[in-house]
Amino acid sequence: MITKSGLRVLLVEDNPDHALLAKNAILTSKDRKYIVEICGSVEEAIEKVKNGPINMIISDYNLPGKNGLEFLEWLNEQEMGLPFIMMTGMGDQKTAVKAMQEGAYNYIVKDDVYLSVLPHVIDETFIKYLSDKEKERYEREIREKNVALEKANRELKKLDQLKSDFIASVSHDIRTPLNSVQESIALILDGVVNTSEEKGKKVLEIAKRSIGRLTAMINDLLDFSKLEAGKMRVHIEPCDIQILIDEVLGSLKSLAEKKQVKLVFHPVEGFPKIVCDAERMVQVLTNLTGNAIKFTAANGTVKVQLEAAANDRINIIVSDTGIGIAKEDLERIFERFEQVKGVNSKEHLGTGLGLSICKELVKLHGGEVWAESEIGKGSRFIISLPFGQKFLKENILLKGEKVTT
Ligand code: ADP
């Protein structure tokens, strides 16, 4: 630490007259302001360094007790990186060389003129020390940036691979319903089936379902690219979330009935409006509830609940009694293109984009979405949204249960 009042130089010199002369010489520096503290021995100097802050050390070699080289050794052990200047007697260049080898920044031989050069040696040493520090900082920054770059590179490669796999699988997934539409039309055009008859109507139904699946996939792709480009806008206004939930459950009623899954919603009387984009919230809830139905076997239950949470937030919980999600997949399923390996059979066709779109849409509302689950027992998807207004917990006490299927 460099204090504003000046750089603290520790001068280790056992001869008081020499110490005073050296101190006065250092104070004549025109480049920098120094504060010089004198110590008569290495032992005393060690105490000073321990109690810091010291910015530079200039030490005589010949001292009572430990000598200057031993002091340097101790400093090296502390790994403080303080600039150290060794003062040696006339003709003792050997010690000076040894000190430099041991990591001293500079040395000065106590000859007849050393007092006049002392301030320059100190100024120079300090400049060298600062530039070394700067170099070290740059090198450290470069090393850190390299590590970050390598990590980003690895992630990009992984994403690139996922994107390639995704394009391959989506092209394949698009071809299946497209073929089915083509075949249905061919059957009708070739007169193999008649649309006024039961068989023909079934063929049309199949074509309609395939077109529905294609539309859903294309909508996912469009939303995904809009979100990736940061072009998705939400139109936020006060909405009755319970009406939206009713709408979602209504649209999924036939799917749930087909799968013999019970849909349950706990309406809350007088539940205040929340601020959100109604269309996008319906999209998110449809995705979560649709998934919940898809991954739940016959006689299971899918429940939607509203819950007050801390910090003026509201939780919308979509829970099911389905197959569950392994712990290691709970976060991954919200990532782009991720599906749980081995889970997605033909019946569960999807792009693997649904949950990542949900996550981004909820984020655009200032909220969060996450999942809790246990394999074989079911899953809970929780959307936490800022409520936008103060409300009383007792307002949203559950009041009865409404079974819609
Ligand atoms: P997809 O469009 O393929 O369904 P999603 O992003 O919606 O993709 O979901 C990702 C994956 O998370 C699904 O493929 C499925 O493996 C798993 N998943 C999502 N919801 C549930 C759930 N309620 N129960 C079990 N697994 C689920």
Image (cartoon, rainbow, N blue to C red):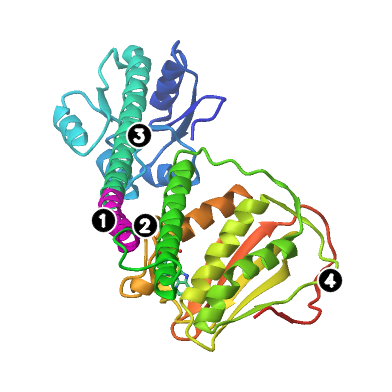
Quadrant into which the C terminus falls: bottom right
Tell me the tag on residue 165. 1
Q: Which residue is mark 2?
A: 337
Q: Is residue 94 magenta?
A: no
Q: CA distance from mark 4 to mark 1?
A: 47 Å
Which of label 3 and label 4 is nearer to you?
4
Question: Which residue bears the numbered disc 3?
Answer: 137
Identity, as a three-letter code, of the amino acid under mark 4: Glu
Upstream in sequence: badge 4 or badge 1: 1
- Residue 174 vs residue 356: left or right? left
Farthest left residue?
Answer: 94
The residue stretch that appears in magenta: 159-188
Residue where numbered disc 4 is placed:
269
The 10 Å Cα crowd at callout 1, few under 14, some 14 to 19, many 20 or more, is few
| Secondary structure at numbered mark 2 | loop
* The stretch drawn in magenta includes residue 171: yes
